[in-house]
Amino acid sequence: MAPLISIKSDDDKLEIVNQLLLPHKTEFLEINSVEEAHDAIKTMKIRGAPAIASLAALSVSQHLTRALRAAEPPAFLSSPSALKSHIDTTLAYLFTARPTAVNLGAATRRLTKTLDDAIAAGKVPREIAQELVAEGRAVADEDVGRNKLMAKWAGEWLLQRVADRGLDASKGVNVLTVCNTGSLATSGYGTALGMITYLHETRKLQKAYFTQTAPYHQGSRLTALELQTLQIPSVMICDTMVGSLFQHHEIHAVAVGADRIARNGDTANKIGTYNAAVLAARHKIPFIVVAPISTVDLDVHDGSQIPIEHRPALEACLVRGIRYPNEGGETEQVQVMITPQGLEGIYNPSFDVTPAELISAIVTEKGVAVKEKGAEGFDLSPIV
């Protein structure tokens, strides 16, 4: 079956699949402005650090493409300085949509560099805008290729690790993942879920396990949809059952994505990742982070410096889905409250930070990094 996609882009037409409606309804939402892109990112109609970065970059490309085609060019195309002021403001605004996802910052910095380099080269506003359009599209186009590279690196590293430990993987390996890191979270193929896909494609995967991190959390539902679409054998478990899973089933690895990786290897990812890492360490199960280079933030020394986004408290009280039983096959969704009304003191962070000491390997499109013997942190220089 064809893989799922999160973004469709053709010339200046830009659409995203509204992930709030998945897995029961697939509906594409047209994005016609930077403001609409910002809203889609902030309200989590699109999610996954690479996909967020792609949408932000593509929305800038769309904005400039339409400006270049306008019968009356907007004022910001009147001079290089006017264009710079406009684009700097636009990129700063987009960055505020999801502050933890460093890929978004990497994309905005990349476009800023393209802008500054073109101005320094003495190019006129229309030329500068055309270069920004091309660079914005490149941010999204390059994602699929690097995802396939890191998926292969991670999959082969795990298979070698299993062989070195003398474990029986004749029927394939079993891998647990947290949150969604597949085609819906990227521009295609995926990161940690890409690794699982690679193992499946090479017939080295026995089963994929994925956590339901909270009743309202959409990531696990999207993972379920992606694995079902790709016909990958899989099992969903509640995040409170990870310890039991490790006790009673042979799990060869935990593989997760990342929203930001600090210089020492501390990694921010969807809430519940740290829990899985602690339990994996207790059971001596390799814990692998699979993420693009753009996720590594060398300006952040360790996880204590990573900003953690907190979602509205109300989100922790709600769950959305279709009615059950549903004999008519209807896809209309309902939202219900699962806690007492007016509940106070709700703790609802979107992410937690897994310390580097609990991570076995960090994989990017450039390869695999492991810690030196006895070291708590990583040297990421070979893979960034």
Image (cartoon, rainbow, N blue to C red):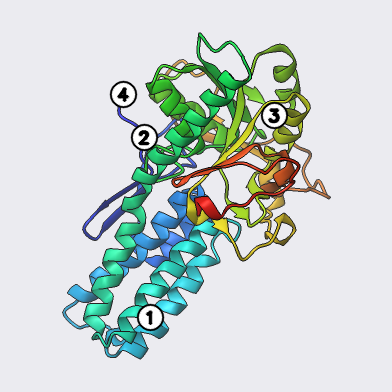
Q: Residue at x 39, y 81 (%)?
A: 86
- The residue that mark 4 highlights is 1
Circles 1 and 2, Cβ within 8 Å, touching? The answer is no
Q: In screen coordinates, is 263 left or right of 247?
A: left
Q: CA distance from mark 1 to mark 2?
A: 36 Å
Instruction: Tell me the mark number nearer the camera, choosing from 1 and 4.
Output: 1
Instruction: Tell me the mark number nearer the camera, choosing from 1 and 3.
Output: 1
Q: CA distance from mark 2 to mark 3?
A: 25 Å
Residue type at tag 3: Asp
Q: In screen coordinates, is 24 left or right of 264?
A: left
Q: At numbered mark 1, what does the secondary structure look like: helix, strand or loop?
A: helix
Q: Residue at the far front: name it.
A: 373
Mark 1 or mark 2, which has the lower sequence index?
A: 2
Q: At numbered mark 3, what does the secondary structure look like: helix, strand or loop?
A: helix
The label on residue 4 is 2
Q: Position of residue 247 (x, y in %)?
A: 75, 16
- The residue that mark 3 highlights is 239
Residue type at tag 1: Asp
- Where residue 102 sits, quadrant-wise, is bottom right
Graded by Cα atoms within 10 Å as few (under 14), some (14 to 19) or many (20 or more), the crowding at tag 1 reads some
The label on residue 116 is 1
Q: Position of residue 206 (x, y in %)?
A: 51, 14
Q: In screen coordinates, is 195 left or right of 119?
A: right
Residue 330 visible in rendering: no
Mark 3 or mark 4, which has the lower sequence index?
A: 4
Graded by Cα atoms within 10 Å as few (under 14), some (14 to 19) or many (20 or more), the crowding at tag 2 reads some
Mark 1 or mark 3, which has the lower sequence index?
A: 1
Graded by Cα atoms within 10 Å as few (under 14), some (14 to 19) or many (20 or more), the crowding at tag 3 reads some
Camera-nearest residue between 47 and 176:
176
